[in-house]
């Protein structure tokens, strides 16, 4: 069984093919980072136009790379949401056109379900499992008791982890996207500044990063006024220590409380060296197996959409010709919706 998937929710145009739910055949990603860099972030209108230009080229490249044609596919999966509406629409319309022309079933996929299922291309899932989703727009702990079912046990109350990274990076005048830049600097610095940790109420699995972001901005501002020099490496290391401490501690506590077989890390911030190391240390002697995806499956790609789409397809999910981009698509409702 072959599933072709399309992902255009943000700033990468991506097409992938997955065989029998878990075998990656091809994974092509056309990134637009260079076009957005000079604006310091993703410009939605530019993203949509790039997707239109890149869609057909990326599709052809994926089919060429796989040595396959659209006729070989069993279904077409596409990211339906969440994301930028104009960006999502390009992928959704491409998928609908292919499915209609080739008379193939069409499946809409939740982008975050995709980030989670990226891990299944590496290792089979064992339930119950928890997923720490840390991306540009999301920070949440997701409990899965079976395939395709998602229960959010905690989430950010303000900024997402990746968003905090990007905003702090901008304050440090680092180029977009800032996450990898801060990560790189943090490796060279030391935790010399004691930034706050947002633990929230006892037992809460929610997160909050806006207070930390403000603390970093205020500290830099104060240093500036006093003509005090703060090494950017140390600011990065101190900021990263706070983020990683909260994420890894809450993830570990949740894994213990829910007695899960696996802890999965998902989303762009899963690429973070500090977070990967802290989680590996925490879970070293735990009964819970820690799964961290390889770097190319952390940030946006279509392989993850094919992996989640294959499961949705085999569970009976089908989209109609009225499939529309849904920028606010809910993860739990997506899982609950079968046919
Ligand atoms: P979402 O998945 O929530 O819709 P998105 O698709 O924009 O948002 P991703 O592509 O999953 O987000 O991840 C991008 C984010 O990951 C950016 O905020 C980026 O700064 C961050 N990121 C990437 N690599 C690293 C890293 N090494 N350390 C920290 N953050 C990183
Ligand atoms: Mg991106
Ligand atoms: Fe993403």
Image (cartoon, grey):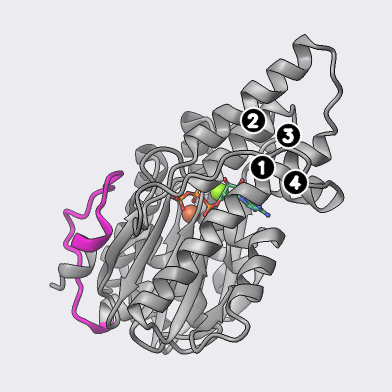
* Of callouts 3 and 2, the N-terminal one: 3
Let me know if residue 109 appears in the view. yes
For label 2, the residue is 216
Foreground mark, 3 or 2, reads: 2
The secondary structure type at the circle numbered 4 is helix
The secondary structure type at the circle numbered 1 is helix
- Viewer-side residue, 120 vs 310: 120
**Disc 4: residue Cβ within 8 A of ligand 1's nearest atom:** no
**Disc 2: residue Cβ within 8 A of ligand 1's nearest atom:** no
Foreground mark, 3 or 1, reads: 1
Residue 74 image position (x, y, % from top left): 34, 82
Q: How crowded is mark 3: few (under 14 residues within 10 Å), some or many (20 or more)?
A: some
Residue 55 image position (x, y, % from top left): 50, 52
Foreground mark, 3 or 4, reads: 4
| Left-right relation of 30 to 258 | right
For label 3, the residue is 175
Q: Residues within 10 Å of mark 2 (few under 14, many from 20)?
A: many
Contact between marks 4 and 1 (CB within 8 A): the answer is yes
For label 1, the residue is 239
**Magenta-drawn segment:** 314-333
Q: How crowded is mark 4: few (under 14 residues within 10 Å), some or many (20 or more)?
A: many
For label 4, the residue is 237
């Amino acid at each position: 069984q072959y599933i072709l998937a399309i992902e255009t929710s943000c700033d990468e145009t991506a097409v992938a093919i997955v065989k029998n739910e878990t075998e990656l055949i091809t994974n092509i990603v056309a990134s637009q980072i260079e076009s957005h860099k000079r604006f310091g972030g993703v410009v939605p209108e530019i993203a949509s136009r790039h997707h239109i230009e890149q869609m057909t080229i990326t599709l052809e490249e994926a089919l060429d790379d796989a040595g396959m044609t659209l006729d070989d596919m069993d279904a077409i999966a596409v990211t339906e949401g969440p994301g930028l509406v104009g960006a999502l629409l390009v992928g959704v319309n491409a998928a609908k056109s292919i499915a209609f022309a080739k008379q193939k079933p069409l499946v809409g996929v939740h982008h975050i379900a995709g980030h989670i299922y990226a891990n299944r291309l590496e290792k089979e899932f064992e339930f119950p499992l928890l997923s720490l989703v840390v991306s540009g727009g999301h920070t949440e702990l997701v409990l899965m008791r079976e395939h395709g079912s998602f229960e959010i046990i905690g989430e950010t109350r303000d900024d997402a982890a990746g968003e905090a990274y990007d905003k702090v990076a901008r304050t440090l005048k680092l180029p977009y996207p800032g996450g990898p830049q801060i990560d790189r600097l943090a490796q060279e610095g030391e935790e010399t500044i004691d930034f706050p940790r947002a633990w929230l109420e006892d037992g809460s699995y929610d997160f909050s990063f806006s207070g930390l972001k403000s603390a970093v901005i205020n500290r830099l501002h104060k240093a500036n006024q006093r003509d005090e020099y703060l090494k950017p490496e140390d600011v990065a290391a101190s900021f990263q220590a706070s983020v990683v401490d909260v994420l890894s501690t809450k993830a570990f506590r949740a894994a213990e409380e829910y007695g899960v077989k696996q802890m999965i890390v998902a989303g762009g911030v899963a690429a973070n060296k500090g977070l990967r190391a802290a989680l590996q240390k925490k879970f070293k002697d735990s009964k819970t197996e820690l799964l961290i995806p390889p770097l190319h499956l952390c940030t946006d790609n279509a392989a993850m959409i094919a992996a989640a789409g294959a499961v949705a397809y085999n569970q009976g999910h089908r989209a109609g010709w009225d499939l529309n981009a849904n920028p606010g698509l809910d993860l739990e409702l997506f899982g609950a919706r079968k046919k």
